[in-house]
Amino acid sequence: MEFSEHIKTANVEDVVLRRPFYQPTKGTLCVTGHHLIFSNRGGDSARPFLLLLRNIDAIEKRPSVSSGTITLKCKDLCVLQLDIPGMEECLNIASSIESLSSLETVSEMYPFFYRPPFLSLQDQWGLSSTEQHYAQMKEIHDGWRVSQVNRDYSVSPSYPPAVIVPHSIDDETLVKAARFRQGGRFPVLCYYHRETGTVIMRSSQPLSGANRKRCREDELLLQAVIDGSELGYIIDTRSSQQAQQARMTGGGFESKSCYRGWKRLHRQLEKGKVLQESLIKLVEACGDQSHSVDRWLSKLENSKWLSHVQTALSTAGLVAECVERDGHSVLVHGSEGTDTSLLVSSLAQLILDPDSRTLAGFLGLLEREWVQAGHPFQQRCAHSAYSHVRLRHEAPVFVLLLDCVWQLARQFPLAMGFSEPLLLRLAKEVYASDYGTFLCNSDQERCVTGVKERTHCLFQSLLRANERQHYSNPLYERTELAIWPSIQPPSLQLWKGLFLQWTDDALHLVEAQKVIQNLVSQCHRPLNEKVENTDG
Amino acid sequence: MYHGHNIREGRWFTVVVILNHITEVQLLDRYTAKKPAIGTLYLTATHLIFVETSCNTRKETWIIHHHIATVEKLPLTGTGYPLNISCKNFHVVHFVIPSERYCQDVYHSLLRLSQPAKLEDLFAFLYNPKQDEDDRRNGWGFIDSAMDFKRMGLPNEFWELTDLNKNYELCSTYHSELGIPKTARKDTVLGSAKFRSRGRLPTLSYYHKESNGAICRCSQPLSGISARCLEDEEMLQAISRANPNSTFMYVVDTRPKLNAMANRAAGKGYENADNYSNIRFQFVGIENIHVMRNSLQKLLEVCAMKSPTMSDYLTGLENSGWLRHIKAVMDAGVFLAKAVADEKASVLVHCSDGWDRTAQVCSLASILLDNFYRTIKGLMVLIEKEWISMGHKFTQRCGHVDGDPKEVSPVFTQFLECVWNLMEQYPCGFEYNEKYLLEIHNHVYSCQFGNFIGNCQREREEMLKEKTFSVWPFLWENRQQYINPLYKCSLGREVLRPSTLPLNFKFWCGMYNHFDKGMQPKQSILDHLLTIIQKRVEGEKKMTDFQRVSRYRFV
């Protein structure tokens, strides 16, 4: 390993660490290939403080004559400060952190070295496969099949090897339909709604281009989806203007005349740079220590983050309404079909499907709709809200999803089997993790780099008994009904648990969660065992 | 006119005297265009009642007349004559009435009934929950603000209660029993009262045992440009001396400096620090009742927007200034609490008359300093002590009777909103829940009970305690509903030190959209916890009963 090349100074004594919730402490700082380790001898016998270098988003150094201060702004929004004696040491440490935290080679990342005693590399990587998922849904076996057309990732590099498609469509047709969709992402099934027998599909945009090309196979595929029923909805996550413009660059949309029975609705969801800048502005606003309410509200408004939350939830609600209330199938896509489409389709499933609201069900949903479906995590989560580097492909689409899920859970506090700490954990893991789950941009990349053989899966780890307990919602009471969120502005709130998690406020919220947990377990304790004995 | 209509036995009466009823009335949803409910509108002497006939459950909507703030007739629409009613508890209802004459009738009746000309026509003088006279009389003794001084440890070596105001001669808008420093001589007290607007002399609001710091309240001094009053200066010194832990005391003027200066021209104003020894003078800049009234008006306009975008909403919220005002009150309360708890200093607080901003700030500081006020009973005591008995002009501020609309202002609502903000920050810190605040707010405006009628204690002694019921025993009886199951009394006498960063001040959906159920969380953690606790208690009771029985059987 060449990590040592990057480490100019490995150890510094008498460093003062300042971090939220703790008094400043003096101790030894150590830089390793993947971590900053801070330990204070003597003092409290607490375990050393470990910080994944990958978690560091921005580093600011202020060296002075005999010492220096390094401020570390992390991707989990925590801000730490290190006071380092000796200017040279300070600069050395800073440059080591800078180069180590920006290493891009996947196979050198920490998940490839993380070997906890409670997990084995022999375990299946991931919770489920497309085939297993399909096998569980007996009711779709007549109309739908698993296609292995993408087994070597040649049809769509970002799709998993197996996808679910209408029974009547053969692989040859799929191959041709894929050529007509950006990135080969032809329409596939993501959710089947038992009550109405309708489905949610997703894809990328059709490549109709400026001269309105058609693709017979793509039309056939969609025709097969609504076979028998009269109407299906295409929810395009771009404005109609954007969709029109996309034709100039070879993209486009399904024209009414070619896709009979399909009605197109446009709901513009922001993504990419706009979304990333929104997050940056929001985090900046949350850190504002000035005492002007007007300024806060105008910054909150200006960040537009809550507007994005509102649009995402309302579009998901629209999809769910088509499926549940109107009994029509829906196809969701934007342009690439790797961001907002996934956001909308997974939120719609949470609204509709009680199975996706359990702890295991939710993680399964994330695995299917985000990891396997090819959300480019590595590109999207390369940097978070503090980074000064020029943005490339970063966008907090997944964080936006978690925020929307939090809003759902706030409005339906009994309906979700998982709790806020799970969402917070995921928000952290997606940027920097001991696990391989969020590495790479697609299933194919994960196979090539050996992620599935040489790293552990986060979702499996979260489902171990003691973790499960921690991430379960003590108030959970399964409801079979759809949970329709209110998207009126007063019903949507700033997610304090995430954006203010390093303030004292969060401590009070954590305390409240503990109290709820205790209360519920007290109330559910068996009444009195003795009595049962008297009976016997 | 009595109608035999089968209205379910509602609040307190078994026979409803119906003045008028109209069938085929539509009740529109405030925000969405979903199908309106159709039903019958009943007008009684005290309530407006809508009984839905378009659903099987015969859902009822009751509106007490005194809650009605405005009634508005709108031009004819396709389906009838719209009548919009806005209530003081922020309930907004849109009726569409089939005939113009009926609409006209209801409109005029409501104008007359919602704001009577005299106090004697308020609901409280009619309300009789079938209790005997002794219970009623005892009910008024349920909360005794003077007892609270005893709880704080008065009289002690520094403070005592005086009866100088027993006939309300010293200050007609104060309570008859006042806490003053032991070293203050009678002529000091009398002289100080003369130098204070409306005789509202400096008197004890809260005494913090742990630090010896005291919060005192009064009205502005009649200092004008240069007037002095030796007795008033002595009075402040006596307060300062009553705290051996501090060499100085704060004098907090809760007004913006500009307002206070303007008052000097009218012979009033603020303390000149040169004339008073060892005071630290401070403005905290809470706006006056008129600014607050207008701000609420703007806030309600934001609430009235139909499906606004997030940007419209946040911009509207900002422009209303409402949360800025809430924060100003909270900041002042926090300042007081810190001065007393951390600096061990005493504080004298005033605004102009000392019955609006001063009441807000003193009661908020008390909550921060003393866990007792974070209990169900404690909040009653606090409201009784700092608001009712110290002359907050409920009749005028709430517009109970026909009067000057410029005297109406949501000062008390703001106080409750500050408490709610604290509850949001400290989910385990309060014995009561949001429902309690909302219920108190309802009754401040409902005029069903005598407590919040009248502008000061003297007015209340004269008529209300003889003829009406007190709200406190009523709330106490229902306290099970108001419990916060997360409350940890282990927080003990811990002083709350809330963050007052702007992002901690949220729009109070539970208050301003309380009646728009679609906007509330669809499931309530609170209700769920209260239910499972209730079940547990019942289960345990059954179990002990069973054990008792089986023990007898087997012995």
Image (spheres, coloured by chain):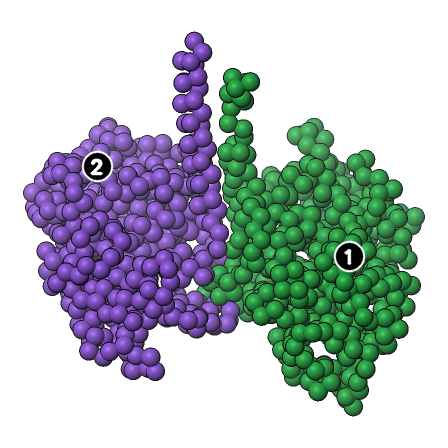
Residue drawn at (18%, 73%) of the image: B105
Residue A290 located left or right of residue B280: right
* Quadrant in which residue A536 is drawn: top right
Residue A293 to residue A110: above or below: below
List the residue tagged with mark 2: B142
Q: Secondary structure at mark 2?
A: loop
Residue B67 located left or right of residue A341: left
Sort mark 2 into few (<14), some (14-19) or many (20+) by Cα contacts within 10 Å.
some
Q: Secondary structure at mark 1?
A: helix
Residue A99 located left or right of residue A416: right
Residue drawn at (70%, 37%) of the image: A465
List the residue tagged with mark 1: A134
Q: Gap in Å between the C-alphas at discs 2 and 1? A: 67 Å
> Which amino acid type corresponds to the residue marked 2 in the rendered image?
Phe
Chain A rendered in what hue? Answer: green
* Quadrant in which residue A233 is drawn: bottom right
Nearest to the observer: residue B175 or residue A380: A380
- Can residue B3 be seen in this snapshot? yes
